Image (spheres, rainbow, N blue to C red):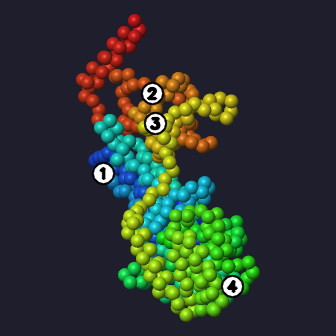
Amino acid sequence: MAIPSFVDRVTLRVTAGNGGNGCASVHREKFKPLGGPDGGNGGNGGSIILRVDPGLTTLVDYHRLSQRRAQNGQQGRGDFANGANGADVVLPVPDGTVVSDAATGEQLADLTGTGAEAVVAAGGRGGLGNAALASPNRKAPGFALLGEEGESREIVLELKVVADIGLVGFPSAGKSSLIAAISAARPKIADYPFTTLVPNLGVVVRGDTVFTVADVPGLIAGASLGKGLGHDFLRHIERCQAIVHVIDCATYEPGRDPVSDLDVIEGELAAYGKLGDRPRMVALNKVDVPDAAELADMAKPDLAARGWPVFEISTKTGVGLNALSFAMAKLVEERRQAAPAPQPKRIVIRPEPVDAGPEFSIAQEPDGEGGWLWRVRGVKPERWVRQTDFGNSEAVGYLADRFARLGIEEELLALGAEPGDPVAIGAGHDPVVFDFAPQIEVGAQMLARRGEDQRLIEPRPAAQRRRVKDAEYHAAADADE
């Protein structure tokens, strides 16, 4: 099966690289076996980036290769060695590519202008090593943070050709011939319906103005309902500065004349929508044929009464083409001056955070088994859970400390949570669930913070140890009384 040369809509699965895990390492050297934490950070995962390439006019490269994956970040290592970042994958797309979410249909980005780009899947962050986690209160963490998974999503790329003038009309009205006559483009031309199967694009130079002209193939009555080919290609004139109706005045089909042809095409444009504000021009084509010239003279007053400029042209002999093309150039220049200059921009597509509080939200929900659980949502707590190695008790203790500092434990208690209640972190049906066990810090009773490596705590002098022991003895005696 041959691969088509023009593709204007594809579905693409993109997966960013995972972040590398941080390293938990203790520096060792002769006569100093425990020299402090020296675990490096993990590298960030590579991202998937779409970038406009002005040399492309089709999405055919993604027609078959519909999955793209970026490189993972490397693991951190000892001796403060950070892991390397994963390489980004940059996917070139044509100017005018619209990016949508395949599941919801929501438009995520509209890429116009050379250099415009969108990060459609962000790489996961690398985890911190234990050297970065060390602090005066936690001098030698025996754990490191895990790297986060890269984003993965299915997107739809849809090409909307960026042209200044859009040509519309019935098949064989002369749209392709008009592009060939006023530009260097050489589209396929023949006198039968649906000669053009892809949008043609030509570059026209008139005076100091350079502009592009595109046509919509196969636009017929009922195109907005899927008849013919026009419905598939109407999107390619959405960005046009103006629309030119190309009307065949030499057709011998019964029931057709310039006014009725224009009404049919306008009806299809109205049914499609999004084009009502564009200026119109009318080109009465094939006036080199005597009967067509007579018909054009008869129809011109009725068409001009609509307030649109009307030109009698012949793409075969060149009659009227200069007047039409210079009028196009003038209109394009006026529209350009009135519009703000587009600026290339970088878009990072991320899911919308749950906006239910400054840092987190807590709600009580049914657990699906006849009971209740507390659901905690928030960017920070959900990210912290993904970074935690639950096989390491120190890492779990560090996570509990982070939750406590954020105020989650305090808020749960204020809402009436009891010790042992299930607490789910994150959305979906498979979150991380804890049994609520609030940690209470009471002065000297909190002798050491969780996640602290006691091997590297400097021993206190004997006299100080005796004073602490005596204080603990008297405290216990007071409690017995």
Residue that sits furthest to the top in the current view: 481
Q: Which residue is mark 3?
A: 357
Residue at image coords 43%, 69%: 335
What residue is at 67 percent from the left and 79 percent from the top?
Answer: 257
Q: Given the image, on which type of amino acid does mark 2 rest?
A: Glu
Q: Which mark is residue 410?
A: 2
First of labels 4, 3 by sequence position:
4
Name which residue lies at 51% across and 78% down: 213
Q: Is residue 44 left or right of residue 299?
A: left
Q: Is the C terminus in the top left, top right, bottom left or bottom right quadrant?
A: top left
According to the picture, the residue beneath numbered tag 1 turns out to be 29
Q: Is disc 1 placed on a helix, strand or loop?
A: loop
> Mark 4 belongs to which amino acid?
Thr
Query: How far is mark 4 from mark 3, CA to CA?
Result: 67 Å
Tell me, yes or no, if residue 385 can be seen here. no
Q: Is residue 304 above or below residue 314?
A: above
Query: Which badge, 2 or 1, comes first in the chain's sequence?
Result: 1
